[in-house]
Amino acid sequence: MVSYKELYKLHADFCKFMANPKRIEILFLLGEKEMCVDEIASQMNVRVPNISQHLAVMRERGIVEARREGTKMHYRVTNPKTLQACTIMRDAMIEQMKKKLETLTSITNIKQF
């Protein structure tokens, strides 16, 4: 049986893929549709080997899965809940930024008096 401490460690390890903005961008692109490496690289304006490295990390974590079609590998998000979780985190971040901006704006308005 897995302890809570072990579960937290597994959770943190799973979330490590999000520590890179390119991997987050790849996740959102693949959330729209299945894509091959060339398509992802073209859309992101990044070299194919770089995208392949990021996809390897994401595959290792179980975030994406691949299927071969001829000479091309096509990738898709393994579980849509991963994308949903990332979207929720982004929304929370944006809300937090808005609150900070409102606070800064109110402080600036107070100093003008």
Image: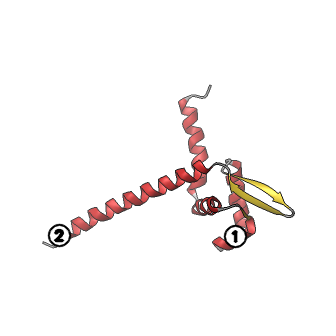
Amino acid type at mark 2:
Lys
Residue at 69% across, 70% down: 41
Is the residue 39 above or below the residue 81 in the image?
A: below
Q: Secondary structure at mark 2?
A: helix
Which of the image's four quarters has the C terminus? bottom left
- Circle nearer the N terminus (2, 1): 1
Which of the image's four quarters has the N terminus? top right
In this view, the residue in front, 87 or 104, is 87
Whole-percent x and y of residue 88?
48, 53
At label 1, counting other C-alpha atoms closer than 10 Å, the crowd grade (few under 14, some 14-19, many 20 or more) is some
Q: Which residue is mark 2?
A: 111
Q: Secondary structure at mark 1?
A: helix
Q: Which residue is mark 1?
A: 41
Q: Disc 2 versus disc 1: distance between alpha carbons? A: 48 Å
Amino acid type at mark 1:
Ala
Total tally of numbered discs in the picture: 2
Residue at 60% across, 28% down: 2
Foreground label between 2 and 1: 1
Which picture quadrant has residue 74? bottom right
Whole-percent x and y of residue 75?
72, 58
Whole-percent x and y of residue 95?
38, 58
In this view, the residue in front, 33 or 8, is 33
